[in-house]
Image (tube, rainbow, N blue to C red):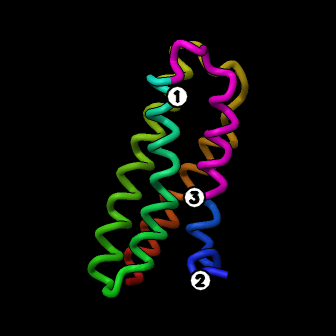
Amino acid sequence: MAKYKNLIVWQKANELALKIYKLTEDFPKKETFGIVSQIRRAALSVPTNIVEGYGRKTKVELSRFIDMARGSLAETEYLLEFSKELGYIKTDISEIRSLIEEVSKLLWNFQKGL
């Protein structure tokens, strides 16, 4: 098993990406190559940047990838809210919002601890 899988920050980021993928399954088909693609890439970029950074040789490089993960998380949060405003999300997303906040704190603390 890859050691990054032991990281709580990766586990939560992975959970978020899965939730975003499932949430966007019901978006309008016309958005398949628009907002669906964009939000999925942003959400998946959070755990993949953690993985890539973890695979690097230095803490400086890892920190740089954590910065990118934080940027992707912010993009995910914005696109989620934008989708809600467009009416594409009709369900309660408070759990996903809480998960975004948790991942944000975990990323920040993980980076500070490097």
- Give the mark, 1 or 3, whose residue is nearer the N terminus: 3
> What's the residue at 33%, 84% (across, down)?
59
Report crowding for label 2: few under 14, some 14 to 19, many 20 or more residues within 10 A (C-alpha).
few
Pinpoint residue 40: horizontal percent, then vertical percent: 52, 39
| Total number of numbered discs in the rendering | 3
Residue type, mark 2 in image: Lys
Residue of label 2: 3
Residue of label 1: 36
Q: CA distance from mark 1 to mark 3?
A: 18 Å
For residue 13, the mark is: 3
> What's the residue at 42%, 70% (across, down)?
52
> What's the residue at 47%, 24% (across, down)?
33
Name the quarter where the N terminus is drawn: bottom right
Report crowding for label 1: few under 14, some 14 to 19, many 20 or more residues within 10 A (C-alpha).
many
Residue type, mark 1 in image: Val
**Residue most toward the right?**
91
Residue bounds of the magenta highlight: 13-32
Asked if residue 58 is positioned above or below residue 51 in the image, the reply reads below
Asked if residue 24 is positioned above or below residue 88 in the image, the reply reads below
Q: CA distance from mark 2 to mark 1?
A: 30 Å
Q: Is residue 2 highlighted in magenta? A: no
